[in-house]
Image: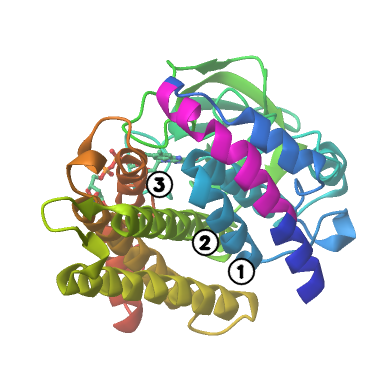
Amino acid sequence: MYSEATKIFDIVEDISQSIAHDEAETIDKMAKWPEKSLRELQQQGLGGLTIPLEYGGLGQGTQVLSKVCEILGYNCASTAICFGMHCVGSAVIASKVTQYQQDTFLTPICEGRHITSLSLSESGSGSHFYLPQTRMQYSAEHEYRINGTKSFVTNGGKADSYVVSAVAEGSHSPGEQFNCVMIKAGAHGVKWGGEWRGLGLRGNSSRNMELNNVNISDKDILGQFGDQIWYVFNVITPYFLTAMAGAYVGIARAALDEATYHIKKRMFSFNGRALASSSVIQYQLGTLWAKYSRIRALVHYATDAFDNSDDEALLELFSAKAEVAESVVEIVNEAMTLCGGVAYREGSKLDRMLRDARAAHVMSPTTDMLRIWTGRSILDQPLLSDT
Ligand SMILES: Cc1cc2nc3c(=O)[nH]c(=O)nc-3n(C[C@H](O)[C@H](O)[C@H](O)COP(=O)(O)OP(=O)(O)OC[C@H]3O[C@@H](n4cnc5c(N)ncnc54)[C@H](O)[C@@H]3O)c2cc1C
C-alpha cells in the first residue's frame, strides 16, 4: 500500500508540475476546463483512484485522495477540484454498485474512458445539499422521470455521467426520500446553463443543469430507496470534504512558497538590506507556516481516522475542513501582505490563489454547517434536525 501510494503521488506530481503548472494561468484567465491534466491523469491510470481493487480501481481511500488533491491544488486549484469531484462521484457509485453499474460506469472510469461528477446542489436548498427538490416520478415499469434544476455542477457539460440526487414520489416508492441516480451525458431532457464565470476556481465548469423529464431506468438508481442518509454521511460528505480540504492545503502551501520566494529576493537599495533579515517578517512567516503545518496535519489525522473506521472520524473530518477553509484564506491573504504591492497587482499568482481559496467557505458542507454539525454531534442532537 505504501509503495503504491508513493507511486501514485509521483505520477500526480509530474502532471501537476508540468501540465497543471503550465496551464493554470490560462485556465484562470479563460475559465477553461482543465482537460489536458484530467486526460493525463486518466491516461496514467488514475481515473479509478477511489474505486475498490475488485472493480478494477486503485482501491485508495480518503487519505490518498486528499494528498492527490493537495499536489494538484499546489499548481492549479481548478484541476484539483475537477479531479476531486470525479473521485467523489466514483466512490459514491462504487459504494453499493450493481453489475450493470459496474459495467456501465466503473469499468470505463478505471480504464480512463469516463469522467463522472456530483450534481447535488440546488438553488432552493443551497448549501443544504441533502434536501433536493428535484423530483423522481415513477413513469412506467422499471422507469422514472426526473425533473428539477441543479446548480454549480463541477465538470458540468464535460463529464460522461453525473451522480444526481432526487426525491422519489408516487405510489411505487415508499414516501419522500432522496436517492442518488446516474444520469448519462447527453441524456434526453438535460439542458446546461451558461458557462461558469466564477471569481475563483474558474476552470471548474460549475454550471446549472436543468432536468426536464429525463428518463432513467431503475438500474440507474444507486443503492436502495431510503439509503440517502447512509450515502450523505458514509461517502458523499467524507469524500467531498477530503477532496476539498486537500486542494486547499495545496493552495496554502503554494501561497507560503510564493511569499518565501518574494521575501528572499526583495532587497532595499536605500539601506542595502534584505526583507528576509527583518525579525517581524521572519515572525510573520513562521506564524503562517505553523498554520499551514497544523491544517496539513489535521487533514492527515482526519483521513486516517476515516480510512480506519474510527468512531469520531466524521467529527474529525468536519473540523479539519472547517479549519482548512479558515486557514487557507488567512494564509493566502497574509502572504499577499508579505509580498507587498506587487502581489496586489492583477494577474499575480496570489491574486488567483486568493480567489480560489475563497470558495472553501461556500462549497458545501460550508464552514458554518460544519461547525453546527460538529456542535450537534457533541451534544447528541440530530445532525440534520433543521435548516
Ligand atoms: C466553485 C464551486 C463548485 C461547486 N461544485 C459543486 C459540485 O460539484 N456539486 C454540487 O452539488 N455542488 C457544488 N457547489 C455548490 C456548493 O456545494 C454549495 O451548495 C453552494 O455553493 C451553496 O451556495 P448558496 O448560494 O446556495 O448558499 P446558501 O445556502 O444561500 O448559503 C449562504 C451562506 O449562509 C450559510 N447558511 C445557510 N444556511 C445556514 C444555516 N441554516 N445555518 C447557518 N448558516 C447557514 C452558508 O454556510 C453560506 O455561508 C459548488 C459551489 C462552488 C462555488
Q: Quadrant of ligand 1?
A: top left
Question: Is the C-beta separation of discs 1 and 2 under 8 Å?
Answer: yes
The type of residue carrying mark 2 is Thr
Q: Which residue is mark 2?
A: 242
Q: CA distance from mark 3 to mark 2?
A: 21 Å
For the record, the magenta segment spans: 11-29
Check the image and report above or below for 4 versus 129: below
The type of residue carrying mark 1 is Gln
Check the image and report above or below for 265 versus 189: below
Between 227 and 322, the one nearer to me in the picture: 322
Q: Specify the quadrant that holds the N terminus.
A: bottom right
The type of residue carrying mark 3 is Leu
The kind of secondary structure element at disc 2 is helix
Quarter assignment of residue 71:
bottom right
Question: Is the C-beta separation of discs 1 and 3 under 8 Å?
Answer: no
Q: CA distance from mark 1 to mark 2?
A: 8 Å
Tell me which numbered mark, 1 or 2, is placed earlier along the sequence. Answer: 1
Q: Which residue is mark 3?
A: 131
Residue 260: % across, % down = 35, 60
Tell me which numbered mark, 3 or 2, is placed earlier along the sequence. Answer: 3
The residue that appears at 35% across and 78% down in the rendered structure is 377
Q: Which residue is mark 1?
A: 63
